[in-house]
Amino acid sequence: DAAAAEAKPFTIADTMVTLATRADFGDYQVNAAMGLAKSLGMNPRECASKIADKIKPKLEDCMEEPEIAGPGFINLRFKQDYLTSTVQSMAQDASGRLGLPKV
């Protein structure tokens, strides 16, 4: 907790969610744990695990369980049934909005 209090502020720019560089890594990769762990004086894999535990409930409807890889990367993969139902919904949208609500 003391290390967290001393750490530099973590911003949205630090989240670093990118498209996966290889299909076997999933659909997206998150390397936020690398920089955050350094700021907190933590092991990057431990930090990635804590991040994954926190985001898991928010992603469980559309993503498989987050996978910790290498020194602290988090791999994210869409659930196949989510992709299937979303594409079907988009295809059946007679309004032409592909299932997106009007803003």
Image (cartoon, rainbow, N blue to C red):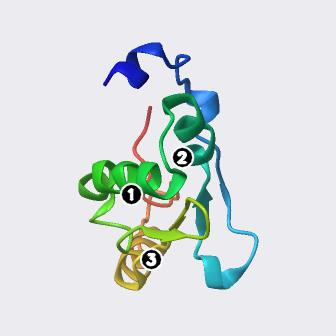
Direction from residue 57 to residue 28 in the image, left or right: right
Tell me the mark number nearer the camera, choosing from 3 and 1.
1
Looking at the rendered structure, the kind of residue marked 3 is Leu
94 or 102: nearer the viewer:
102
Q: CA distance from mark 3 to mark 1?
A: 25 Å
Neighbourhood count class around disc 1 (C-alpha, 10 Å): few under 14, some 14–19, many 20 upward: some
Neighbourhood count class around disc 3 (C-alpha, 10 Å): few under 14, some 14–19, many 20 upward: few
| Residue 57 percent across, percent down from the top left | 23, 55
Looking at the rendered structure, the kind of residue marked 1 is Ser
In the rendered view, tell whether residue 23 sits above or below residue 2: below
Residue displayed at 61% across by 63% down: 71
In the rendered view, tell whether residue 74 sits above or below residue 79: above
Q: CA distance from mark 2 to mark 1?
A: 9 Å
Q: Earlier in the sequence, mark 3 or mark 2?
A: 2
Residue displayed at 76% across by 70% down: 21
65 or 2: nearer the viewer:
2
In the rendered view, tell whether residue 9 sits above or below residue 67: above
Q: CA distance from mark 3 to mark 2?
A: 27 Å
Say what secondary structure mark 1 lies in: helix
Tell me the mark number nearer the camera, choosing from 3 and 2.
2
Neighbourhood count class around disc 2 (C-alpha, 10 Å): few under 14, some 14–19, many 20 upward: many
Contact flag, marks 2 and 1 (Cβ < 8 Å):
no
Q: Quadrant of the C terminus?
A: top left
Residue displayed at 42% across by 66% down: 93
Q: Which mark is residue 49?
A: 1
User: Badge 2 is on which residue?
Assistant: 33
User: Badge 3 is on which residue?
Assistant: 83
Q: Quadrant of residue 56?
A: bottom left
Looking at the rendered structure, the kind of residue marked 2 is Ala
Q: Which mark is residue 99?
A: none
